[in-house]
Image: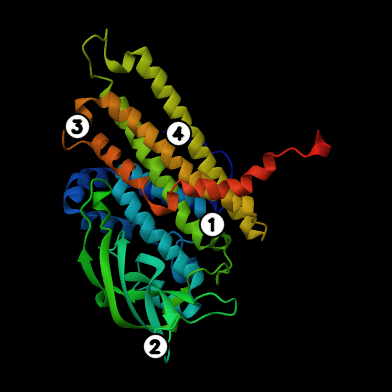
Amino acid sequence: MTETLSRPLATSTTSTDGEEYVARARALSPLIRAEADGMEAARTVSEPVVQALRDAELFWALVPREYDGLGLGIVPSLKIVEELSCADGSTGWAFMANAFSTGIAAGYLTERGAREIFALPGRGITAGMILPTGTAVRVEGGYRVNGQYRFASGSAHATWIGAGFSVTGADGTPEIDANGQPVCRVAFVPRAEVDFTGGWDVMGMAATGSYDYTVSDVFVPEAHAMDTFSTVPVRPEPVYALGLLGIGVGGHAPVALGLARRALEEIASITATKSRPGYATVIGDNEMFRREFAHHEATLQAARRYVYDLHAEAELAAGRGELTDEQRARLRQVTTWVQTVAHDVVSFAYNWGGSASLRNPSALGRCMRDALVATQHALVEPMTLVDAAAEILPGYRLSVDGL
């Protein structure tokens, strides 16, 4: 896909650094594509792919250099996800879950906790649920955590598992903060102390390893826990000022972009030689196909530009302490909207693919299944557009004085 993004990358490293790591992700495409069918059958990312991601250091894209990470900003990190998702949707999704939760932890844990989890030689990879599904009782030095969790994407190769909880007293009474709200925290638990219970057998995004798991009376030191709904990062890098929601939600957008891009690659190749009864030549020469291709390709290019420009501008504004409510709303808007764009692009390709879309193994069929599942995530539920509109609408309302 032609690169159309023209604005500078908003990043804590140089643009060259960001491009280098995006290129590393792109270089893994042949391996990931070769492993994709087997990974879908196994329902998790394969060890050769995981090791390649480790060797390329991509899991730590959003971890500060001070903690032995890459120290990238949001745009190159999103582009890495797009490249991996173009190679295989599940790989991109699982990586996104790992790298972006890892980035959140690095930005919001105390320095001691972040160094213990992310610094070399045992540089950790996180996965898991951060919403307060579980409960915990305060004890000396930390918490004793209990909870049942779902959808731990990328958990098969993660070394630390997130477990969100609300704090209660010994009698189960919720602890309340100064604002009258329940105290909610996220614990990061060593993998060995988590019981995985399976539960991931789905039609799409099958290789994400999004397993259910249980945490049973595990002690978590205070240094390995952070506020669930904090808006104040510990680290000074601008990317963390986007907030837990800004980082955690945004990673879904490039997964959609990657899926759509792969679908266009597949259908362009298929239709170069595929014929149908009643067509004068191969489908790729058909005027109706070419018109639809041009339309969907333009929509994808526009969506891609909006995703990256908006995130670049938001990170720059966040670094200046000027991130507005409208910008936050637009981050939610674009991440949800691009799922629909991707679904439409993939559907176009799938429908023109005919039997090539149906026969297993089929990369185009997998794109369709993955796109259908990607639209179902709670973070890109259509109601997020309703919420975003509350901040966007006022800018379009004409004042009487201005008429």
Label 4 secondary element: helix
Q: Which image quadrant for residue 221?
A: bottom left
Residue 3 versus residue 322: which sits nearer the camera?
Answer: 322
Of marks 2 and 4, the one in the foreground: 2
Residue 130 versus residue 40: which sits nearer the camera?
Answer: 130
The label shown at residue 377 is none
Of marks 3 and 2, the one in the foreground: 2
Q: Is 328 left, or right, of 194 in this rendering?
A: right
Separation of disc 1 and disc 2 at Cα? 49 Å
Asked if residue 349 can be seen in this view, the reply is yes
Q: Rate crowding at label 2 as few (under 14), some (14 to 19) or many (20 or more) other CA atoms within 10 Å.
A: few
The label shown at residue 358 is 3
Rendered residue at 47%/52% (across/down): 250
User: In the image, is residue 6 above or below residue 286?
Assistant: below
Which comes before the other along the chain, label 1 or label 4?
1
Which residue is labeled 4 in the image?
Answer: 300
Which comes before the other along the chain, label 3 or label 2?
2
Q: Quadrant of the C terminus?
A: top right
Which comes before the other along the chain, label 3 or label 1?
1
Q: Amino acid at mark 3?
A: Leu
